[in-house]
Amino acid sequence: MVIFFRKVAGDCVKITRVYEIGGFQNPHAVEAKRLYDTDNAEAIHMALKPGQSLKKHITPVDVFFYVLEGKGIVEIGDEKQEVEKDMLIESPKLASSASQHWTRHLQVSSSESA
């Protein structure tokens, strides 16, 4: 594989081997690796085993999930949808305190992981 990039003065390219990143403890008690973390953005890889789920929670920022493999159910606010490999789920940040009842929830179904 060949990667081409342009270096901008003062900036440098950082390449990370994802398999070398260690996991971290999280409130959902699922396997999680912080792939990218800056003041402006964060990317976390979460691996859920069949029957595992993320706890319902509220986040004040835009969130997206990308399903790498498997199937599951995502619940955002009053919406509940089945999702599977190669689907991107967008979940907007909470617009006001009146929306505080919105939660995000993801559960893996069948014998596959998501």
Image (spheres, rainbow, N blue to C red):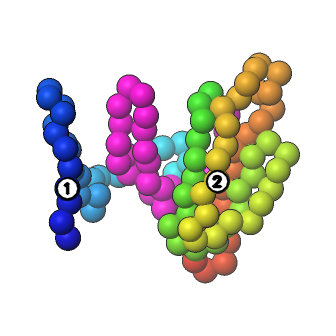
Examine the image and state in which quarter residue 100 appears.
top right
Residue type at mark 2 is: Ile
Percent x, y of residue 19? 27, 62
Disc 1: which residue: 4
| 105 versus 40 height, above or below | below
Badge 1: residue crowd in 10 Å (few <14, some 14–19, many ≥20)? few
Whether residue 51 appears in magenta in the rendering, the answer is: yes
| 75 versus 111 height, above or below | above
What separation in Å lies between label 2 and label 1 (alpha carbons)? 29 Å
Percent x, y of residue 91? 67, 43
| 92 versus 15 height, above or below | above
Return the residue nearer the eye: 19 or 4. 4
Look at the image and tell me whether residue 60 can be seen: yes
Examine the image and state in which quarter residue 60 appears.
top right
Q: Which mark is residue 89?
A: 2
Residue at 20%, 60% in the rendered image: 3
Magenta segment, which residues?
30-59
Element class at badge 2: strand
In this rendering, position of residue 84 left or right of residue 19: right
In this rendering, position of residue 19 left or right of residue 103: left
Badge 2: residue crowd in 10 Å (few <14, some 14–19, many ≥20)? some
Element class at badge 1: loop
Residue type at mark 1 is: Phe
